[in-house]
Amino acid sequence: MLSNYFEDLNVGDRWVSRARTITETDIVMFAAFSGDWYQLHTDREWAARTQFGQRIAHGLLVLSVASGFMDLSEGKVIAFYGLDHVRFTGPTFIGDTIHVELEVVEKKEKGPDRGLVKFRQEIKNQHGKVVAVADLLMLMQRKPQS
């Protein structure tokens, strides 16, 4: 979907990504990279005593993995414009397999060569349960004028 020009996208268009399994290595590497060593993510014994009963992935790790699912084509996406209304609606456990479902929910022209597209992004696990939701805003290239 992000490989299309602004004009080729229509409100209601949907796209489903490939999937990827979240591993313990993902969590450890993200903790090391981000500096977020909170026990819920990194301490098996501590996390076992929480409502989740085990470690869960960082919410920002889940969003980061989801961003890697996007099919970006050179010249179509000008810039990532932002995320609005981000919510983590369920845990992502080690071993869960997540994917993204996108829907075009709004389009705005931003000039003769670009437009802003709002996508509703749902990140789901292997059971179809939504674990995160956000409005993804992308500045998209318009078709070149002949």
Image (cartoon, grey):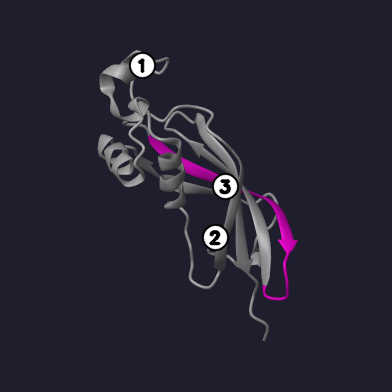
Task: Tell me which residue sits at (27%, 17%) in the image.
Answer: 45
Q: Amino acid at mark 3?
A: Leu
Residue 85 counted in the magenta span: no
Q: Is residue 13 above or below residue 5?
A: above
Judging from the image, what secondary structure is the residue with disc 2 in?
loop
Q: Answer with the quarter of the image where residue 24 lies.
A: top left
Residue range highlighted in magenta: 97-113
Q: Is residue 44 left or right of residue 38?
A: left
The extreme front residue here reads 35
Q: Amino acid at mark 1?
A: Gly
Q: Looking at the rendered structure, which numbered label has been put on residue 102?
A: 3
Q: Is residue 68 above or below residue 4?
A: above
Nearer to us in this view, 34 or 94 = 34
Q: Are marks 2 and 1 in contact (CB under 8 Å)?
A: no
Task: Tell me which residue sits at (54%, 60%) in the image.
Answer: 2
Predominant SS of the magenta segment: strand
Residue 18 in sight here = no
Where is residue 69 shown, x and y percent of the image? 44, 51
Q: Is residue 121 above or below residue 4?
A: above
Nearer to us in this view, 19 or 113 = 113
Where is residue 67 shown, x and y percent of the image? 46, 51
Q: Which residue is mark 1?
A: 53
Crowd rating for badge 2 (residues with CA inside 10 Å; few <14, some 14–19, many 20+):
some
Q: Looking at the rendered structure, which numbered label has been put on residue 68?
A: none
Where is residue 106 shown, x and y percent of the image? 71, 52
Q: Looking at the rendered structure, which numbered label has been put on residue 2?
A: 2
